[in-house]
Image (tube, helix red, strand yellow):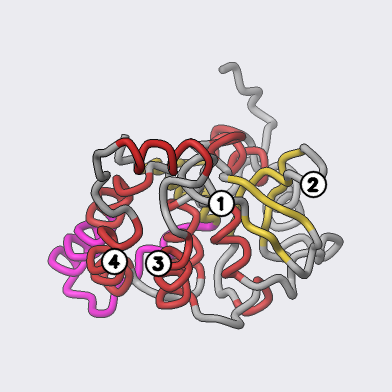
Amino acid sequence: MNVSADEQYTSEPIRILSLNGGGVRGLFTISVLAQIERNIENRSSANGVKIGDYFDLITGTSIGGILALGLASGKSARELEPVFFENALKIFPPKKNGFKKLIKQIFNPLYDSKPLYETVINMIGTDSTFNDLQRRVLIPAINLSTGKPQFFKTPHNPDFTRDGVLKLSDAAMATSAAPTYFAPHYCEDLTAYFADGGLVANNPSFIGLHEVFRDMKSDFPNATVKDVRILNVSGQ
């Protein structure tokens, strides 16, 4: 990339944490983040490190979206880690063999959404909204009622406040409603059905980068691509 001498840059890099989808492989993602927190504490003698504090934007898809919302709500990866580990096999129970089971899977989702919803509530609460979040976050999903991608986000752009009062649990269930695995999620507040964000951005790094130069532009008016640093964590 050629950069002219008179181009302006931010004094600090813009940091994006990008968490991929991947179902039960989210165990790897949250374990990596928790270990990073431990390493920071060991090297700096700091206490109560929360990895979300080190990023200007957190973006995540599917299980990565649920974790992103948990981090954006002010929790540490180490707080979220045991919740997911304790519930992983409830959310994704081992597959059973048999003809009846096969027939059922043809006409029904592979997994029940209830254990997933209960885990989401344990992580981010029942009534918390995007207005309650302490950090910027961006979560992709597919709006099945319109057939278009939809991106849930904090109101970091004062001109975009649509999602401010939206429940985090709705966004979490929407981005993780993987076709054939879970039923589509119906959001009453938006009167629409949603499916997994992995259908549009299983790796949400690019949409995070795009967000910096769109709805975060007022916060970083002189930013260029050279200023952006992305940490992408994936279990795939």
Label pair 1/2, CB-CB below 8 angstroms: no
Comes first in the chain, label 3 or label 1: 3
Q: Distance between the residues labelled 3 and 4?
A: 8 Å
Q: In which quarter of the image is the C terminus?
A: top left
Which residue does the numbered mark 4 point to in the structure image?
A: 87
Viewer can see residue 61 = yes
Comes first in the chain, label 1 or label 4: 4
The spot of residue 138 in percent (x, y) is 61, 54
Comes first in the chain, label 2 or label 4: 4
Q: Give the range drawn in magenta.
A: 33-56
Which residue does the numbered mark 1 point to in the structure image?
A: 183
Front of the two marks 3 and 4: 3
Secondary structure, mark 1, is loop
Which residue does the numbered mark 3 point to in the structure image?
A: 115
Label pair 3/4, CB-CB below 8 angstroms: yes
Tag on residue 212? none
Q: Residue furthest left?
A: 42
Comes first in the chain, label 3 or label 4: 4
Q: Quadrant of the N terminus?
A: top right
Residue depicted at 23% across the width and 75% down the height? 46
The reply, left or right, for residue 46 in relation to residue 213 is left
Q: Which residue lies furthest to the front in this view?
A: 100
Chief secondary structure of the magenta span?
helix
> Are there few (<14), some (14-19), or many (20+) residues within 10 Å of tag 2?
few
Q: Does the magenta stretch include residue 209?
A: no
Q: In this view, does 132 lie above or below 88?
A: below
The reply, left or right, for residue 110 in relation to residue 108 is left
